[in-house]
Image (cartoon, grey):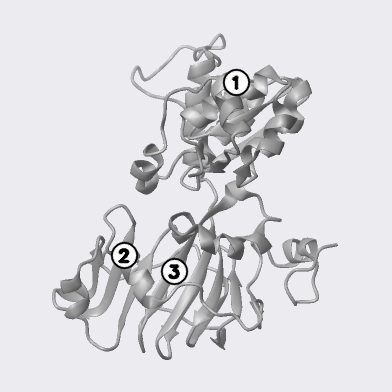
Amino acid sequence: MAAFFNTGLSQQQFLDEYWQKKPLLIRQAFVDFESPISPDDLAGLACEPEIESRLIEENGPEGTWQVTHGPLSVDDFSRLPETHWTMLVQDVDKHLPGVQYLLDPFRFIPDWRRDDLMISYAPEHGTVGPHTDGYDVFLLQAMGTRNWQVSDKAIHDVELMEGLSVQIMTEFTAAQEWDLQPGDMLYLPPHFAHHGVARNDCMTFSIGFRAPSQTDLLDSVINTLLEKQLATGRYSDPDLQITVNQTEIDSQTISRLKQLLHDTIDQAEPILTQALGKYVSETKSSLATLAAESLTDLPSIQELDELFGKGGELQRSLYHRFAWSADTDGGHVYLAGESYFVDDENCSYLPLLTEHNAFTHTDWQQIKSSEQIVNLLCQLIAEGGWYWLD
């Protein structure tokens, strides 16, 4: 079984013993690690209007824990003190494809669960305060030293400081504490409180794994039911009894409602995979503008054949989210919140269309005999999921 870094655990043992259960410190997860990006590079990304970034100052000119949302400017940086601030940039793995290799060791976890690689830079004493997150995160120290304090259990009922645009706990008790050096990594399950403080100029790479909320999933299920014209039944009460209070919603009514909702979920079972696939493949709102830049007209099969014949190569868009699923009667490809059906005999091609970073002439020769898959590739290109590499 594949090893999980240098922990002595296999990847499955990590999932069984730690994933969503308890923190894990991994010394030298990336041996002799050197950051592929400098603080100046990160600051440059934070100044780009299409890139999501934040500047958090513990004592800003406008108040305590001041948050400035990007794009940041030269003026923002020039007024900063020497200590006690943090700059954060989201989705660096999409904006800088050269850092994608850092995600490779985590691909035993489904890609649709991964949110992004966020990078933070902080000088001495820089922090975003003690807080909890509702997702799994791997915190890789990339430069300098950061002190981490972590709670001993998940905390769901958190009291936050009032009047702030960042979520900072009013009380925090640490059960464990470590200093992380470059190459060290800390895994934290959801809702474990943590507090990271820079000992010196440092960068931390956060690889986050999101999970849909119950309401998000219900919303996607409802939308898919409406789309498929399913669950059209209505509330019924054939066991109705004479009412005493004409405007009361009684307990029997609520029991019928609960049963109706249970029946609705049972009817939704055939479309649950599609509902999830559509939801997890939706393009992040912060990346929508960049994702739209690769939209194009629907290409013809002849165009593809000619371009591949000339040595052309397709690149998978990092601004789009892909997923796929297979069932007994076929499968689906999910891209940008849309679902595309594939016959059962063509399901073997789904990883090729959704997981590879590049699509070459060799790949084209492999799918060329399948009209359905070729047409699907044309559709994915038109939607911006694949684009021609210059």
* Dots 3, 2 in contact, CB < 8 A: no
Q: Position of residue 87 (x, y in %)?
A: 33, 72
Residue drawn at x 42%, y 76% as measured from the top left: 38
Question: What's the distance in space between the residues labelled 1 and 2, CA to CA?
Answer: 39 Å
- Mark 3 — residue? 119
- Comparing labels 3 and 1, the label whose residue is closer to the camera: 1
The residue under label 2 is which amino acid type? Ala
Q: Seen from this angle, which residue lies furthest right? A: 1
Q: What kind of element bears circle 3? A: strand
Is residue 241 or residue 256 the one in the foreground?
256
Measured as percent of width and height from the top left, residue 194 is found at 49, 75
Q: Where the N terminus falls, by quadrant?
A: bottom right
| Disc 3: CA contacts within 10 A as few (<14), some (14-19) or many (>=20) | many
312 relative to 101, above or below: above
Question: Where 83 falls versus 192 (above or below)?
Answer: below
Residue to which mark 1 is pinned? 375
Q: Is residue 386 above or below residue 241?
A: below
Q: Residue at x 42, y 29 (%)?
A: 296
Q: Determine whether, in the image, residue 129 is placed left or right of residue 298.
A: left
Q: Is residue 288 left or right of residue 303?
A: left
Q: Is residue 170 visible?
A: no
Q: Amino acid at mark 1?
A: Asn
Q: Amino acid at mark 3?
A: Ile
Q: Which mark is residue 46?
A: 2
The answer to whether residue 101 shows anywhere in this view is yes
Dot 1 falls on a residue whose secondary structure is helix
Identify which residue, 97 or 22, lies in the foreground.
97
Residue 76, x across and y down, in percent: 19, 72
